[in-house]
Every structure is written in C-alpha cells, then in structure tokens.
Image (tube, helix red, strand yellow):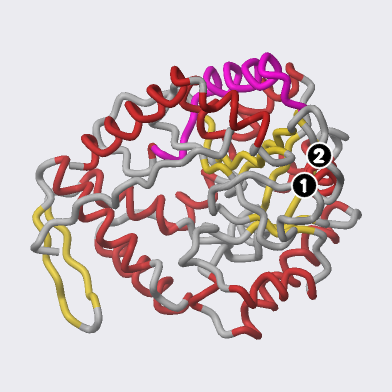
Amino acid sequence: MPSDNRFLTSLKLELAYFSGLPLLRGRRAGGAGVIMRFERVRPRRGVRFQPLKSREITPGFLDRAIRALKRWKYDIVSMDEACQRSVRLASPRRFACLTFDGGYKDLMEAAYPVLSQHGVPFTVYVPTAFPDGLGEAWWLALEAVIAREIRLSLVMDRKERHFNIASTSEKYQLYDFLSGWMRTLAPPDLSSAIRDICTRYSVDLAAVSREASLDWSDLAKLAADPLVTIGSTTVNYPVLSNLKDAAALREMTMGRAVAHAAFHRDVRHFAYPFGDRASWRRQHAAMAQEAGFASAASAIPGVVETEGRTNLYALPRIAWDGRQRSLRAMRVILSGITFPSAKPTRSAGF
C-alpha cells in the first residue's frame, strides 16, 4: 500500500539522520546547495480525500523549515544568486533557494506573510494564462469531481467508461489513474476530456481555476518586493513532452513575453511545468536557453553542484512532500540522500 511505502521511506530517513551521515555528506558531497520546490501553502484540512496533499505544506511548516535552514547555517538566496554560486568554487556555506510553482492564490494569503517575516528571498514561477482566468487547472477540477461523486462516467479513447468510487480508497485509485492518463494527452484532447467531465458533473472548471490562482494584482504586489523573483512556467502549463517542438518553444517564449510586459522587467528564470522526467525532454533545455532564460528548473531531485557541473537549464530541485513533516527527514534529503518512492497502487479494474 502507498501508506506503507511512505512509512518505510520516513523510517529510512529518520535512521539516516541518526546515523550522522547527512552531516558528513553535507560537508563532503553536498554540492553548492539546494533548490527547494513547493506548490501550495495553506492550513491543514480535515477532509479524507486529498489526492494532492503531497504538494501542500502548512504555513507553520514553512516557518519551521526556514528557521531550521537558518539554524543549519544555510544561506537562503535568490535564484540569481543560486545560479551564480553554481559556477563558482565551493563555498564554506551551502545555499538554499526557495521556489514556488503553480502561481496559487494561497502563496499570497498564507506563505507570503511567513516569508516576509523572515526576510528571505524566494522565486514564484507563474503560468501566465492563469492570472487572466484563462488557464485550466484540470488537476483541481478532477479532484473536485471525484471528491463528491460515488460513480463516475467519462469517454476515454472514444469509449464510455464507468467507475464506482464510493470508498475513499477507490477515489484515490481513480484519481491516480485518470490524472496519469490526462498527463499523456495533447493539450486539445486534455481540455476536451476535463471539460466533458466537468460538464457532466456540474463543476465550473473556470471558477475552480480562477479561485485557486494569483491574479495580476497579487502578482504586482509580489513583484514590488525586492526579495521576490518572478519567473515563468509557460502560458498554459502543458506537459511539454506532449507538444511539438514549435509549440513547446512558443509556450516558453510567450510566457516570458507576457510576464515581461506585465512587470516591466526581464524575466530570467523558467520552470518546466510539472517538472518530472516524463514531462520534458533534453531539447527543451536548449529551447529554454533560446527563449532567453538564464535558468530552467526541473522537479528532478538532486543538489546543485559547484564549478559549473550542474546544467543551468536542467536545475534539480527538492520537491518537498507535504505529507512528510519531519525536519530530520528534511536535513537528510537536503544532504543529497534520496530513497526511491513506489508508485501508488492502481486497481486492476482501471
């Protein structure tokens, strides 16, 4: 079961911490530093079905994490500084760079007060269709549909499919199955699929997307803060590997152009939508450079090495799992030690 796998991973991380290995590795092989990837920051919710919980942290945890980074003698730096340190000789102190993907509204409501209180720099990667209310947060709409239904029907590959989802475990299995399928679709097919589901089950896709997203007023307030770096993550947040090269490059260049026009400043940094190994390819790194960015961040785990050994257009990031709240585990992961996590179990009926 997925929960058993998470328990084993947590146990391994705790044992690694008490072994003293993270401190030793941090001194010898920890690279220049780490880029941390977060998505949503909001108070803990009591609902049972939370398929995206791994992408959330609470404001309290963010506060604890920043305090811990300072206690562990990390320099919390901007993305510009992180890129500069990656090409220098090793420094006595490692850096931590805080980044936030998705452009969620709760960044302003729950995270920004904590970050401002600590006076630390951070980067926000914005998909520029979403502040205009034009982006489709299909993963949130899918969650909303599955959360309230006990049966679900949809067209998959031109066939009508039916699922019984009365139990919470069945809801998790279906969410995993459908979100994995949707991530393989070309953008027009993905849009058609999620609109079909939302129409059938009376979920307002536009409202769900708009309510979850920062608007231009929020972003203007963030952009006025010298500690905030505004980056781009395309226009529509597509899986780049599902696009033809010309369309992928257009998403990059247009996202940068829209952000540049909105903030009247050079937008230097990019993050691949979703960011894992399946969502972008090697040629996209060259495209990010062609589009004029100074860096491109992935969600592939790892530390940033010194002396130019890390490709600035394939920057690794520690994508923090919000179900894990142990600072001891964080210290182990920031040292570069990782444990593979098993994929969630899918029902044979799916």
Q: Nearer the viewer, residue 19 or 242?
A: 19
Q: Are marks 2 and 1 in contact (CB under 8 Å)?
A: yes
Looking at the rendered structure, the secondary structure element under dot 1 is loop
State the residue at coordinates (66%, 72%). 251
Residue 306: image tag: 1
Which quadrant of the structure image shows residue 53? top left
Q: Position of residue 341 (x, y in %)?
A: 34, 46
Q: Considering only order in the chain, which callout, 1 or 2, is on the residue closer to the N terminus?
A: 2
State the residue at coordinates (74%, 43%). 219
Q: Looking at the picture, does residue 317 appear above or below residue 27?
A: below
Report the amino acid beneath label 2. Answer: Ala
Q: Nearer the viewer, residue 115 or 30?
A: 30
Residue 90: image tag: 2
Viewed as shown, does residue 205 lie left or right of 127? Answer: left
Looking at the rendered structure, the secondary structure element under dot 2 is loop
Q: Looking at the picture, does residue 191 appear above or below residue 306?
A: below
Q: Nearer the viewer, residue 178 or 303?
A: 303
Confirm whether the magenta stretch covers residue 72: yes
Viewed as shown, does residue 122 lie left or right of 147? Answer: right
Confirm whether the magenta stretch covers residue 270: no
Viewed as shown, does residue 139 lie left or right of 260? Answer: left
Q: Looking at the picture, does residue 45 appear above or below residue 104?
A: above
Counting other residues with Cα less than 10 Å from the Cα at mark 2, is it few (<14), some (14-19), or many (20 or more)? Answer: some
Magenta-highlighted residues: 54-75
Q: Position of residue 80 (x, y in %)?
A: 84, 46
